[in-house]
């Protein structure tokens, strides 16, 4: 195995990227702004079914700064940044619960760059210029196993015909295109569909996380050319498996960032909130859970940057550290989210308390692409050497 560099390869360039992201998000994506975008009227989201908002002007700034190009190779017009730097930026995005199609687009970039086909390179070039994209691979049961993909691909002369549904598509109403997995007689293929493709119908899911939207795709009689097939049936499974460590690392970074916000906010509250003429932080029943949460978050961050470094220097061995990172980050976020609501007391359960935005984002990310139990099951198969280990995503 390749020796990992010092500090997980996190150097001056990665520090600059994080600081740039923090400066922008502190200025344009504060919790005050977040409340104006997604938290002004709970009835609008839950009763009337309105889409959560996001600031498109700020998003254009992100594109101008090259955030969508980070995971795109330089040969395709991108930055070709190290995963350690991308993870640092996504951690800041999670720390601000920033509503945007960034995470979904970075995930698609990870898959496309692993495909290396002419179609994949063409779409990577578009992403570098600002096109946004979301991965559509899940069946109605919500399993992340590729064998349960419900979209079917068949030959139709010189074209490929697609029929079926994909569920749990992240930020589906913000993106410009979808990276779709489809089953064929020969295996799993990957295709890109623009949002305005004839025969594609986008439906809205109701989710508790107000910082993003989620949808499902229905494909009926969709016809695409071979030029939009980014991975053939004989290579699709291999492409997705190779990209999966990057996918899990990106979601883990968002979890760690959101968890850190909850920890710092709760610590600050415990310092100023008085009970029995003492600050809440004086009491062991408050101090001990916060210390436990801090240790869990620090552990998750260590796993995160180990996974990011593995993606950078030894991608063939990155699956184990990436699954460990997702497991640790999901567990830490769940624990911190619960303690944050609890330790804020009565106000912690209210709409007026900003904690609920991050609580819901953490719970959504915990389940996304498999929670801690799912990841540990996969790790057991990989490490113990089950005959089926690594056979599925």
Image (cartoon, grey):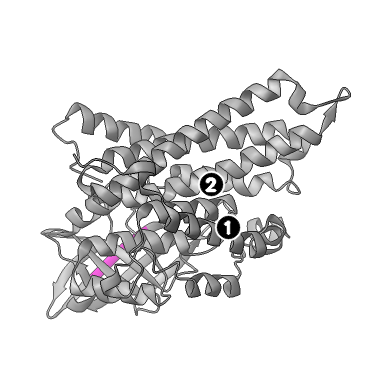
Quadrant, the N terminus: top left
- Tell me which corner region of the image, top left, top right, bottom left or bottom right, holds residue 262: top right
Which is nearer the eye, 236 or 262? 262
Q: Position of residue 257 (x, y in %)?
A: 53, 47
Q: Residue at x 33, y 69 (%)?
A: 219
**Residue 41 falls left or right of residue 139:** right
Q: Position of residue 170 (x, y in %)?
A: 45, 59
Secondary structure, mark 1, is helix
Q: Main secondary structure of the magenta part?
A: strand
**Residue found at the very far right of the displayed protein:** 277
Q: Which residues are magenta?
A: 162-166
Q: Determine whether 107 is above or below 308 in the image.
A: below
Q: Determine whether 172 is above or below 353 in the image.
A: below
Q: Is residue 188 magenta?
A: no
Which one is earlier in the sequence, the residue at label 1 or at label 2?
A: 1
Q: Residue at x 71, y 63 (%)?
A: 36
Q: Residues within 10 Å of mark 2 (few under 14, many from 20)?
A: many
Mark 1 and mark 2: span between their CA atoms? 11 Å
Q: Residue at x 73, y 48 (%)?
A: 351
**Residue 342 falls left or right of residue 119:** right
- Tell me which corner region of the image, top left, top right, bottom left or bottom right, holds residue 47: bottom right
Q: Position of residue 314 (x, y in %)?
A: 23, 46
Residue at the spot of label 2: 257
Which is nearer the eye, 133 or 48? 133
Q: Determine whether 224 is above or below 90 in the image.
A: below
Q: Is residue 164 magenta?
A: yes
Q: Position of residue 84 (x, y in %)?
A: 39, 51
Which is nearer the eye, 173 or 77? 77
Residue at the spot of label 1: 22
**Which one is in front in this view, the residue at disc 1 or the one at disc 2?**
1
Judge whether residue 202 can be spotted in this image.
yes
Which is nearer the eye, 363 or 116? 116
């Amino acid at each position: 195995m390749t020796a990992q560099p010092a500090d997980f390869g996190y150097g001056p360039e990665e520090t600059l990227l994080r600081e740039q992201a923090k400066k922008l998000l502190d200025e344009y994506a504060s919790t005050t702004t977040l409340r104006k975008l997604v938290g002004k009227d709970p009835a609008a989201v839950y009763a009337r079914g309105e889409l959560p908002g996001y600031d498109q002007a700020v998003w254009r700034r992100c594109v101008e700064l090259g955030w969508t190009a980070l995971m795109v190779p330089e040969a395709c017009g991108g930055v070709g940044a190290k995963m350690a730097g991308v993870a640092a930026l996504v951690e800041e995005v999670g720390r601000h619960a920033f509503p945007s199609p960034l995470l979904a687009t970075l995930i698609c970039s990870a898959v496309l760059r692993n495909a290396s086909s002419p179609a994949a390179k063409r779409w990577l070039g578009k992403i570098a210029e600002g096109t946004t994209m979301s991965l559509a691979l899940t069946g109605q049961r919500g399993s992340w196993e590729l064998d349960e993909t419900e979209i079917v691909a068949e030959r139709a002369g010189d074209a490929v015909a697609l029929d079926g549904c994909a569920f749990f598509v992240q930020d589906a109403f913000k993106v410009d295109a979808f990276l779709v997995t489809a089953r064929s007689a020969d295996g799993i293929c990957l295709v890109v569909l623009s949002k305005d493709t004839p025969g594609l119908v986008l439906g809205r899911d109701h989710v508790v996380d107000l910082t993003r939207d989620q949808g499902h795709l229905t494909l009926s009689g969709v016809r695409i050319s071979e030029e939009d097939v980014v991975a053939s049936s004989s290579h699709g499974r291999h492409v997705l498996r190779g990209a999966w460590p990057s996918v899990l690392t990106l979601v883990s970074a968002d979890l760690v960032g959101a968890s850190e916000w909850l920890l710092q906010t709760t610590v600050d509250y415990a310092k100023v909130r008085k009970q029995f003429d003492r600050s809440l932080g004086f009491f062991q029943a408050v101090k001990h859970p916060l210390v436990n949460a801090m240790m869990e978050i620090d552990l998750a961050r260590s796993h995160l940057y180990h996974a990011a470094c593995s993606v950078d220097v030894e991608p063939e061995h990155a699956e184990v550290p990436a699954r460990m990172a997702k497991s640790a980050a999901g567990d830490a976020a769940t624990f911190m989210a619960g303690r944050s609501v609890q330790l804020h007391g009565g106000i912690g359960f209210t709409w007026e308390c900003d904690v609920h935005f991050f609580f819901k984002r953490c719970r959504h990310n915990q389940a996304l692409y498999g929670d801690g139990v799912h990841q540990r099951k996969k790790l057991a198969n990989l490490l113990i050497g089950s005959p089926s280990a690594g056979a599925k995503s």
